[in-house]
Amino acid sequence: MKVQMRRSAEMAIPIISFKDYGFQYMAQAEPTLYHINLDIYPGEKVLIAGTSGSGKSTIGNCINGLIPFAYPGEKTGELLVDGKEADKSSIFELSHTVGTVLQDTDGQFIGLTVGEDIAFAAENDCVPQEKMRQIVDKVAELVDIGHHLEYAPHELSGGQKQRVSLAGVMVEEVKVLLFDEPLANLDPAAGRMTIELIDTVHERTGAAVIIIEHRLEDVLWRSMDRIVLMNEGKIIADMPTAKLLAGSLLLEHGIREPLYLTALRYAKVAIGEAMHPEHVERLALSDAQKETVRSWYQKQKAYIRRQDGQEELLRIENLEFGYTPQSRTLQGVNFTIHKGEMVSIVGRNGAGKSTLAKLICGFEQPLSGAVYMEGRNLSGDTIKERAARIGYVMQNPNQMISKPMIWDEVEMALVQSGMPAEERKMRVEETLKVCGLYPFRNWPVSALSFGQKKRVTIASILVQRPQVIILDEPTAGQDYHHYTEIMEFLKDLNEQGYTIMMITHDMHLMLEYTPRAIVFSEGKMLADTTAAHVLNDPELVQEANLKETSLYTLSMACGIDDPQTFTECFISYEKKEGR
């Protein structure tokens, strides 16, 4: 109640105010932002959405002071942060008003322990130790990380790292909390918990919350006051959530709308603001609209069937592994991948998915069990020998990139293989175009965003055309346009006979592109089944720390008692219509 009263009293004065603001990076030929007029008020929750290159991250960098103090350039217009001109302040001064939680949380850690990391800002302000401990304990309790203060940051899961980063910026009791793609590297349940955490912190502190993200459905697990939609450096829309979702602007500008809304559109159900389209649980459907959905379902009824009789390519047999003698990261893993399959590996953060990929590639050696390729045990092969047949794209692009220039990074493996220069040029150009990197082919890697670096690492593997491609979170940090571009390319490769395994937290990716899913939790394989079944089995969803698809909720609300088949119909319809 006090928070609400404080917000009402302060609403007349914006905490962030862009006035006809424009910005052009020093290294760019054209501006990134054009005529931005945007006010954000104390206590508001605002989502800024847009495709890669739309300018949404640049907006965030202006608010927290990275522009112009870290990324110089030419600005027009005015930006006020808490009533002061941002470009006449400093990053240090702005950090007392704006706390930023980065997409790459690993790049934000400074302390050797969680407690040290949270205390960093207070140390800089020369806060006495006793008071500093009280501050750390208070914010750690607020984000539910108090029982991990002695842990090293690298020992934490992705969701826990988000909590530490959030605690670190809350030490200053900031008025604005800015989140740059907070869900990019989290499993579905951890992402949902992060949104719940942000919502809780917002209610307790009254700070304005700005989330920069394109995973709309996941962010809308909790209410947002409004959505600012950006495209090509301009604000296309700034409106309440329900109004934006009821229209077509999101799809027109390359942002995927929530799945349940897409399903309603497929069924020819008109979407209006009064329907409460921002929350699937609150969706107000009339009996006639529910009947329309049921009729569409009956017409589209189809089943996704596993392909049998395929030739075995990769076999995992009784695999056991532990990073220490006392622990078992993987226990008794058995499955077979056939030639030409496209398979998702899913499960909670820390379930052992990435460890499995490292064992297949030979980066780690199993305690027992074996990896077979076309019936041959790979235990005697070197990492280089395996790499000729098994390509691996890691989750963190910074761990893979070794060349300063984009072209050189993508071409590197081809140079080492002795491929003729003309063939190399053709192969690299083709791959860069597919990955959306061709315009940047002569750029340094250091000039790229996290998501763009991700595409560079994917390109450096795809260019080699390996027999099996294992991708750890291939679409993390990608907007819908680039997500689709990369996935369609992988799908084309798959149709040419390449076998693809994807470790992913993106449940729509799993549903749309991989008929089969292998589910892990705490080092054990829980299921090897259809993708649709995974997200329509409540017990499996809970055990694997996943999240039921909103199609499940919609089907139940419409009286369809077979949500798995409803989900399969949705995916089948999308493929048939070429969506």
Image: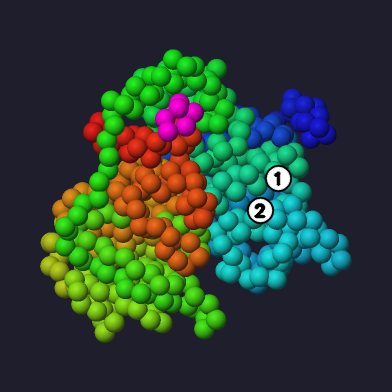
| Vertical comparison of 144 with 204: above or below | below
In this picture, residue 222 sits left or right of residue 500: right
Q: CA distance from mark 2 to mark 1?
A: 9 Å
How packed mark 1 is, by other alpha carbons closer than 10 Å (few <14, some 14-19, many 20 or more), is: many
Find residue 59 and name its label: none
Callout 1 secondary element: helix
Q: Nearer the viewer, residue 548 or 427?
A: 548
Is 242 part of what is drawn in magenta?
Answer: no
Q: Which residue is mark 2?
A: 166
**Amino acid type of the residue that numbered disc 2 sits on in the rendered structure:** Leu
Q: Are marks 2 and 1 in contact (CB under 8 Å)?
A: yes
Residue drawn at (34%, 27%), measured in percent from left and top?
297
Expressed as whole percent of the image width and height from the top left, the position of residue 237 reads 50, 26
Q: Which residue is mark 1?
A: 201
Q: In which quarter of the view is residue 15 placed?
A: top right
Q: In which quarter of the view is residue 567 placed?
A: top left
Query: What's drawn in magenta, residue-wise?
Result: 556-561
